[in-house]
Amino acid sequence: MAAHATAADRLALTKEEAPAPTKEAEASRIIGRNVLWAAGGGVIPLPLIDMIAVTVVELKMLKELSALYEVPFEEDQVKSVLVSLLAGLGAPTLGTALTVSLVKSIPVAGLASAFLTVPGLAAAFTYAVGKVFVQHFASGGTFLDFDPKTVREHFARQFEEGKLAVSKTKTESSQQKTS
């Protein structure tokens, strides 16, 4: 009888046998989706509102990741962790992000330059937050035992990796448009 299985039967068997995505794969999808939302938040033309939108996206991402890793989520606690991570990048990076957001208030030129910069910074920061927390949760950590000081260097590396990934995505996108 198995020799006479229809294409639909084989497809049904294949779906049943397909392995469920791993936590790491699901975490990567959560991060990727929220990186795009954060970049979209960075496009908001209103100074500081863009930063609020990105923060909301990051809170949403951390809630999704904490659910995936079965870690209790308390919004107030998570907000203070995000502020600590941002502060850990140092005054130059923090100052640049704030300045670029505020530059949006300058008609035309300011808005154009911020439009090119803020989405990339927002995406890179969101990427780094996601990667740092996936590593922390995967090793059994929670928001309660998260210490931003101990992950500062790792976070900075992930932030740089995020900036490179955003740059690569922009390059690939513009190459596809010209093709």
Image (cartoon, rainbow, N blue to C red):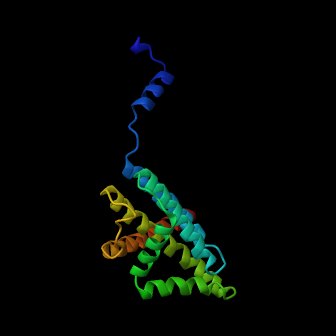
Q: Is residue 24 left or right of residue 75?
A: left
Question: At which x and y percent is residue 5?
Answer: 45, 17
In this rendered view, identify the residue nearer to me: 163 or 60: 60
Among the 4 quarters of the image, the one containing residue 105: bottom right
- Name the residue rendered at 44%, 13% in the picture: 4
Q: Is residue 117 above or below residue 6?
A: below
Q: Horizontal and vertical percent for residue 104?
A: 63, 83
Q: Give me the residue at 40% from left, 14% from top.
A: 3
**Residue found at the far right of this picture:** 107
Quadrant of the image containing the N terminus = top left
- Left or right of 154? Residue 118 is right
Q: Residue 79 at x, y = what percent?
A: 49, 70
Please tell me whether residue 176 is drawn above or below residue 88 in the rendered image: above
- Image-based side of 178 in relation to 155, left or right: right
For this orientation, the residue located farthest to the top is 1
Provide residue 102's location: percent of width, then percent of height: 60, 86
Residue at position x 63%, y 76% in the image: 49
| Towards the viewer: 3 or 101 | 101
Residue 179 shows in the view: no
Question: Residue 112: in sight, yes or no?
Answer: yes
Q: How many marks?
A: 0
Q: Quadrant of the C terminus?
A: bottom right
- Report the residue at 40% width, 64% height from top: 143
